Amino acid sequence: MDRPPPRTDPRRTSWYRQVGRRGWTAFAAAWGGYVLDGFDFVLITLVLTEVRAEFGLDAVQAASLVSAAFVSRWLGGMLLGALGDRYGRRAAMTASILLFSLGTLACGLAGSYGALYAARLVVGLGMAGEYSASATYVMESWPERMRGRASGFLISGYSIGTVLAAQVYSQVVPALGWRWMFYLGVLPALFALWMRRALPEAEDWEEAIAETAARPNPFRPLFTRPDGTPSPGRAALHLGLAAGAFGALLVLFTGRAGDAAWPLALCAAGALGTLALRLGGPDHRVLYLALTVTVFAGFLYTWPIQALLPTYLKTELHYSAGQVRDVLFWAGFGTAAGCVLAGFTGDRFGPARAYALTLTASLAFVFPVFAVHDDLLLLGVLLFLLQATSFGISGLLPRYLGGHLPVERRASGLGFVYNVGALGGAVAPLLGARLAEGRPLGQSLAVLTFGLSLLVVLLIGLDVPGRLHRLADRRPS
């Protein structure tokens, strides 16, 4: 009698073989989109001094061009995330890359500050969808026990895109001018669209749709009463809140708020907080709000350096374009290496513990980075270590956030809480610019990064969102 073939023990199979061809195909397509995402998004930070000189902008106006993409991200995350939950992750991925590619082209064609700001709003819409749809797609295509690696490896693509942008900047801008950076940023989008046309759908999403036999509608809580019946009044209220939040943020981040800045900021925060509570529904409202606050703090600690490092290098250290390229090369690859490391540590120790421990280690490098002036190699090495342990560990954010959210609302939930929280990235460069009005820019960046990193260590290390969710979910016995 023939014996059946022996079964393969998954524990003895290399992890990359366990991912399978389908999982790696999904990863390759999403990672390519993230490379383009990083390339297109950081272009404005690289050419900020050139744009400022051409349009005659002050420091706050120039910083607002970085912030502009964050103003629209929450809306793009909500809309494209809902598209991903209802019609599949592939559709949302394709729509997102089209949006931020068109926005990048419009940046190159802009003839004024207003036109460039509007183009950056479009970039933000597309970037939001790219994050939520691609991250959800890859994680749902990989085995559960390897989703930390899926998350970290994927986010590394963004860092590679920033490195490529820095390399192109040093060659293109001195010869052709800043606009050509944006023209070149559009071309690779064609490849990404071609690559995504025949992708398989995410397994988790297909299974969830098959089980329920209905496509989810993440916006239902905004337009219906608790019993599920339509409510025109609730629909009008929530549309008004969305419009009010967008308008308030637009005024705030174009520097037109004047004495009304704080009231407008509070109105925007209240409107977005209310939308988070309503989108979460009765079972997840506290979770949505707590995750949003956590991501907001995460962007506050990473984006002062991300947005204003090129400006610091050029204005305070007086580095040439080639030297800026070299420093950003170290920083970008440090972030990429940190994302890859985060994938392994997240699977080994859990995303919350790995995040908190690594971010705590990053505090040792913050002030030394800004103490180095003339030693390019030492500055590069310190930035590599800082970005690997601070910005790099944020590669676990999709895993951390997605692990709290149900499959049928994962793309919309991740898209909303991450991209509303990403408004911290809009606040960070403006805050850094404001602080630098009374002290050196490098000192301001160091203080912001150190203090806010400590806050995130507490929020994620203690899993404050999860604890609050469990506390709110308790019912009297």
Image (cartoon, rainbow, N blue to C red):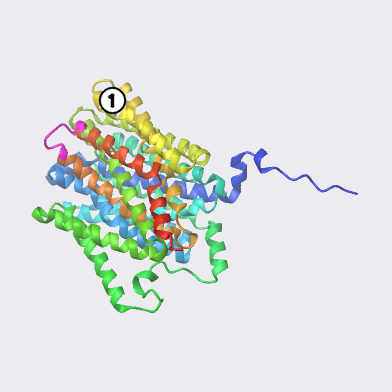
Q: Nearer the viewer, residue 155 or 390?
A: 390
Q: Nearer the viewer, residue 477 or 92?
A: 477
Report the residue that reaches farthest toward the front.
Answer: 477
Question: Percent position (x, y) of residue 179?
Answer: 25, 45
Report the residue that reaches farthest toward the left.
Answer: 259
Q: Which residue is mark 1?
A: 368
Please check the rendered image and state whether residue 190 is part of the magenta-colored stretch, yes or no.
no
Describe residue 33's horizontal placement relative to residue 265 as left or right.
Answer: right
Q: Nearer the viewer, residue 126 or 202?
A: 202
Instruction: Please report the residue visible at 20 percent of the width from the left and 62 percent of the height from the top.
Output: 247
Number of marks in the image? Answer: 1
Q: Nearer the viewer, residue 162 or 341?
A: 341
Describe residue 475's horizontal placement relative to residue 267 as left or right.
Answer: right
Question: Percent position (x, y) of residue 351?
Answer: 46, 43
Q: Can the viewer see residue 367 in this picture?
A: yes
Instruction: Please report the residue visible at 27 percent of the width from the left and 65 percent of the height from the top.
Output: 242
- The local secondary structure at tag 1 comes to helix
Q: For the residue carrying disc 1, how many other residues have a C-alpha within 10 Å: few (<14), some (14-19), or many (20+)?
A: some
Question: Percent position (x, y) of residue 318?
Answer: 19, 28
Report the residue that reaches farthest toward the top.
Answer: 375
Q: Looking at the image, is 363 positioned above or below residue 434?
A: above
Describe residue 146's horizontal placement relative to residue 326 as left or right.
Answer: right
Which amino acid, mark 1? Pro
- The range drawn in magenta is 435-443
Quadrant assignment, res 264: bottom left
Q: Can the viewer see residue 112 in this picture?
A: no
Quadrant assignment, res 440: top left
